Image: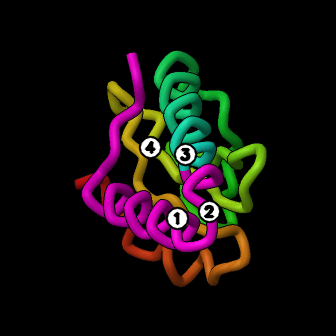
Amino acid sequence: MKAAFSRAATRDFVEVVDFISSESRRAANRFIDEVEDALIRIGRHPQIGVERRELADPPVRFWTLQRYPYLMVYDAAVSPPAILRILHGSRDLPELLSGLRSD
């Protein structure tokens, strides 16, 4: 089972891929592959990510992509786990995560 994107995560994903593609299509493809791997890993092991209570209350968890400065924010309590956002780690996470929903 794979984790599934919310609408907001889908928008985030497309924006990141477009941004990376503007510099390197090869890098964008590697990003896509890494996200796909993370979807499988989170789907199989929803508790794998870390809780960051200063940013969001459980069951929201965070998974950092290995080669990219992006976080996958997800709801581990639903099946399949719902990817809520994909955000660059340097952004204002508390602001972006306020009112988080898994639509």
Secondary structure category for the residue under label 1: helix
Q: Amino acid at mark 1?
A: Ser
Q: Amino acid at mark 2?
A: Ser
- Residue at 53% from the left image edge and 73% from the top image edge: 22
Q: Which residue is mark 4?
A: 75
Report crowding for label 3: few under 14, some 14 to 19, many 20 or more residues within 10 A (C-alpha): some
Q: Which residue is mark 3?
A: 29
Residue 14 on the magenta segment: yes
Q: Amino acid at mark 4?
A: Asp
Residue 5 on the magenta segment: yes
Name the quadrant containing residue 66. Answer: top right
Whether pointer 1 and pointer 4 mark residues with C-beta atoms closer than 8 Å, the reply is: no
- Residue at 45% from the left image edge and 59% from the top image edge: 85
Q: Which residue is mark 2?
A: 24
* Camera-nearest label, 2 or 4: 2
Name the quadrant containing residue 93. Answer: bottom right
The magenta segment: 1-28
